[in-house]
Every structure is written in C-alpha cells, then in structure tokens.
Amino acid sequence: MPDKFFDILPPKTQLSPRPEILPPKPVKKKIPKRKKSLILVVVLVILILTGFFSYFALSRAQIEIWPETQTLNFKEKIEINSQKTQPDFSAKIFPGKIFEVEKELSQEFPATGETLKTAKAQGQIRAYNAYSDSSQVLIANTRFISAEGKLFRSLENVTIPGGVYDEKGKLTPGFLDIKVVAAEPGEEYNIGPSTFSIPGFAGTPRYTAFYGKSFSAMTGGFKGEASQVTQEDLDKAKDVLSNKLFEEGKTVLKNKISPEFVLLNEAISQEIIEATSSLQAGAEAQNFNFRVKIRLKSLAFKKSDLENFARGFILAKLPQDEFFSEEDFWLKKKIQEESLKINYVFSSIDWKEEKIILNLEISAKIYPSLNETTFKKALFGKSLKETQILLADQPQIKKSEVKFWPFWVKKVPQKEEKIEIKLNLEG
C-alpha cells in the first residue's frame, strides 16, 4: 500500500491592525421617577401661570370705528386792513401788515430802429499861390475839383500867402493848408491823394496858377441805413426790466415775510422810482443801456387769523340745541383739522386805505366726538358678538372692526387702558 503524503502549508503571516482606542461611553444617570414627576408639575405650573399672565396682563381689545362724517362748504366775504391790530370776528375784519422792498437793474438793449444816414467826406488840401507874390483871399465854400472830378468846398475864409521870388526871378509858390468837405455825401468821395483846381478862376490867368494838392485820403463819406434808438425801444426796455424786477421782488418779499403770513400776488403793487436811458430816442447807435429802479409794496395777513375764523364760523353753523351728559356715548361734533381748507379769492384792493376785500371759500369735514370713557365702560366684559351688536346699534357709526389679542381672548378686558379705540376719518 503506497504511502500518502500531504503538503502542509504554513498560514500566511498577517499584521494585526492596532486596536482603536474609543472614549468611554458616558454612563446615563437614571432620573428617579419621583423627580420626573416633580419636574412635570413645575413645568405645568409655569405654563398655567404664563397663560394667566397673558390673559390678564397682555389681553387687548382693538376697535376701529368709521364714524358718520359730513363735509360742509361755506362762502364768506372778509376784509384785511393794515390799520387793525386785532381780528374782529364779528365784523369780519382782520389785521394786515405792509411789507416793502426796493430793487434796481440795468441792462444793455439793441436799437431796432433804422434811419438813412449820410455823411460828407472831409480832408485837407494844401492850396498853392503860384500867381504872384501877393496874397489871395479865398472865401468859405470856395470850390475845389479833384482830378477824379469830385467837388469839395472850403469850410472858412482863408488867405493864401503870395509866392517868393529868388535872385533869378523865379517864383516859389506860397501855400496854406485848408480844410475841405465834399459837396455831397457818399463813400465815392472818400478819394485818395489827388490834385485840385479852383473852377472859380476858370477863364483867367489865375486858373492855372492857383491849385491844390492833398497828401492823404478824404474820409467819412457815407450814405446808407444806420441803427437808431426808437421810443418803442425805450418803452420795451423799461417794461422788460420792470417785469423782471417785479418777479425778483416778489421772491424777495416772500422770503422776507414769515411763513405765518399769506401773500397774494394781487396784493403786491409796483412803483417805478427811476427809469433812465444812456441814449434818447432818435440817437444813432446799435445799442443803448437802460436802468430801472422799483419799489414793491405788499399787504399780507396771518393765516392763523382766518383759520380761527373759519373754525368758529363752521361750528357756529351747527345746531346749538343738543345737550350732552357724561353718560352719552357721543358728544358735540368736531372739525377734522386735516380737512379744513380755505381758498382765498381776491376781490379788490385799496392801496390808499391799505385794505383788501377777499372772498373765502371754506370747506371742512365734521364728525361726532366719542366719549371714550363711557363707551369703554359699556364694552367691559362683552364678547366679540356682543361688541359688534353694540357698535351696529350706533347710528353715528357707519363701519367698525373689532380685534381681540391674543387669539384666545374671548371678551373685552375690564380695564380702560386695555381697550384701544381708533376713529378712522378717511373713509
């Protein structure tokens, strides 16, 4: 029988991992049942106390009421008078105050007029006497004709000195510079240096012996349209500056006057103190300067005076036969201050007497005033339904909303300070 052989293989060597060290698990302490019961009781008591506190300390009732309102409109005529110092409501006369300011302004304006402008050329001619050693008188307006045929005249009487003979008997002409002006206006007479003859000597030996020369151009000749200041230009400049000063003056006045005053544009007067021009009507110029100085005078009144009058006027128009007691929910009607509107309609002004007549357009909303103390006491302890019924039974109320807080509150609290009543006059 053959022998049996078995191969025995040694086990593979494996490195054992390093054991992980874990933190020790906390040992839960068991709470005794008796202690648990005590904690639950404490929590329950706290919750109950919190509930009671919330109910009694935090409970609120919020009631919003839209009362019946009425808008009243009235018209009334009043007087503003600077001589008054106190309002007279019965006579409907109220004090006014005078404010003044002065302003001035100057500005350059273009001349819009046109005129036919003419000018004669002028210059100087040297007149020669080559005739003899005797002087020669030439009267004013003596004619001189240039080589171009342009006629000029002397401006005044002159005497041209005689010539001087030398040793050989040759005559050196005498001469004199004289001023001349063209016979006609126009640029064509602005000629350059030229020679001149004297036609008055024509037909005589003197004609060739007396002559003239110019050494510079004649100037100033003109014929055409030129700018001219017109009366319309002056009037327009005055109006432009006056209007500008008036607008500027109004701004100055309104800044100067306290906000408690009302200033109407119709209650401002303007007086022109000075109005001067650098040129008069008819002057030839392209531009001119105009200056205006004005005084603004205004009559203003206090807004509060008329507001007080309007309040009293409206309340005086309400029925006076109503009587109220502390037990009533509703008292006399009031004016909603925000609704009071006064429109000042200008009628007339007398600057001599310094008074204004105005038409007032008065508008305001009135509503019944609520006796909150009595009303709140009537709501004490009422449920939501009972509160709504009480509100619905009030003819002075057209709409209302009731809210209790927190949500678990079911009745109106028994304290006035925990009841909030809001009158809504916007509806």
Image (cartoon, grey):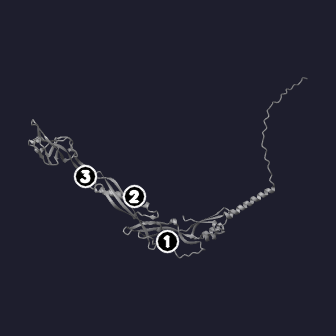
**In the picture provided, is 200 more to the left or to the right than 19?**
left
In the rendered view, tell whether residue 240 sits above or below residue 20: below
Q: Which residue is mark 3?
A: 115
Is tag 2's residue or tag 1's residue first in the polypeptide sequence?
Answer: 2
In percent of width and height, residue 42 lies at 76, 59
Amino acid type shown at disc 2? Glu
Please tell me how crowded label 1 is: few (under 14), some (14-19), or many (20+) other residues with Cα within 10 Å: few
Amino acid type shown at disc 3? Thr
The C terminus appears in which quarter of the rendering?
bottom right
- Which SS class for mark 1? helix
Q: Which residue is mark 1?
A: 312
Q: Which residue is mark 2?
A: 248
- Which SS class for mark 3? strand
Q: Residue at x 16, y 47 (%)?
A: 153
**In the picture provided, is 77 more to the left or to the right than 390?**
left
- Which SS class for mark 2? helix
In percent of width and height, residue 258 lies at 45, 63
